[in-house]
Amino acid sequence: MQSNLSITVTLVVLLLFFARPSSVLAEPGSSFSSSSRSKEPKPILSDGFFLGGPISAAEISRDFSKIVIAEMRLFGIDLHSIENGERLASLDGFGKDVVVNGLRFSDNGKRIAASAFHGNAVKLYDDKGMKIKELAVPEGKAGIASLSNFFLKDSKIAAGLGDGSVVAWDVESGNVVREMSFGSGPLLTLAIDEDGRQMFFNLETDKAIGVSDLAAWTSNNEEQQHHATFTKLNWDRECEMPRNGRIFRTWYIVGCEDKTARLYDAQSRELRRVFDRELPGLTFTFNHDGDRLVIGGFDATTEVWDLKTMTLVDSLGFLNIRYPILAVGIAPNSSVVAVAAKNRVKHWTLRGTETSTTKKTTEECGEVEKDKTECKAN
């Protein structure tokens, strides 16, 4: 009887221990010997770090220094260092039972935007995580369905709404600078080029990529800016149910329902490459020079492509899990990729790009008695 009671008490203590909330935990290596399991694992760059719980959205800054994450369990938004996982700030989020559907860094990394499903405002924060203002959706409009990138030198941002319309704001003043409608049904993906001249989008009811010429963005006539008529083009009907479109310089990339990712020349609108995948591409990013493309998929794999030669540089697996990749980032020198999925962020040094720092990191794998070859591969 006493033995059974001791076992019960021990189990309760263990359950309380593992159920406790946590912010960031160093991720251990993927394999340990029995003698090393009792040791406190050291954070290793190639192994990344754990988060407190499953994430619903994430975004990595273009300078590869920070990641902003929305946690599903805690309904909070946190800002972390991309290098070691240190939590830098907890952002004022949207409250309990509200799922964040959009997180964006400005190109210069000084602003963060966040939106929630069916929300009536986009929240803006500075790079320290302090809330600056809310960009309100006009009264009578549907809630937010998608969030665009920052554009026009980070001075504007837009959101696609549940009624098929788009609202754009001036970041500094918080004022609405444009409203436009493209039909009915939620606008599921929205991307605007950095000059604010073209907008790529998808209506749930259309099942095709749309593109509009937004030359009037730069008009000096405020009335023309606000009330200009836009033409929707059913540009590509071969891509059904486009999702998570991203634009960078002359490139536009989008995932399609047919388990492909499609890359276009954003200026000529010419299809440049179809990437066949086991499952649709979920998230994308480009390196600083625009000659590397990183694709994160629903199948927990990440691919890095050379856009000059259109060849695969590296294919990265996310341990033994099969959870959707929610964010990808690539270092300015294109040597390291960071990937966020489920409750962790993982780093990879791309093949052929090891530096003295990364070599030192892989050697540290020996401190947890891990095979060095396997460590370098991860």
Image: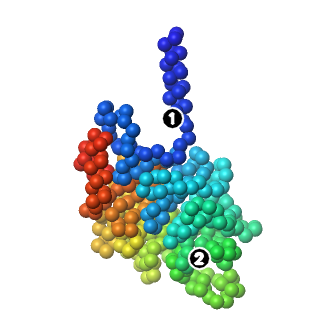
Residue at image location 75% in from the left, 68% down from the top? 139
What separation in Å lies between label 2 and label 1 (alpha carbons)? 44 Å
Q: Is residue 301 left or right of residue 104?
A: left
Quadrant assignment, res 181: bottom right
Whether pointer 2 and pointer 1 mark residues with C-beta atoms closer than 8 Å, the reply is no
Q: Is residue 9 left or right of residue 304?
A: right
Give the residue type that dot 2 points to.
Ser
Q: Position of residue 70 (x, y in %)?
A: 56, 54
Q: Position of residue 371 (x, y in %)?
A: 25, 43
Q: Residues within 10 Å of mark 1 (few under 14, many from 20)?
A: few
SS for callout 2: loop
Which residue is labeled 1 in the image? 18
Q: Residues within 10 Å of mark 2 (few under 14, many from 20)?
A: few
Residue closer to the observer: 121 or 62: 62
Residue closer to the observer: 191 or 249: 249
Q: Pick out the residue farthest to the right.
A: 139
Which residue is labeled 2 in the image? 155
Q: Is residue 299 visible?
A: no
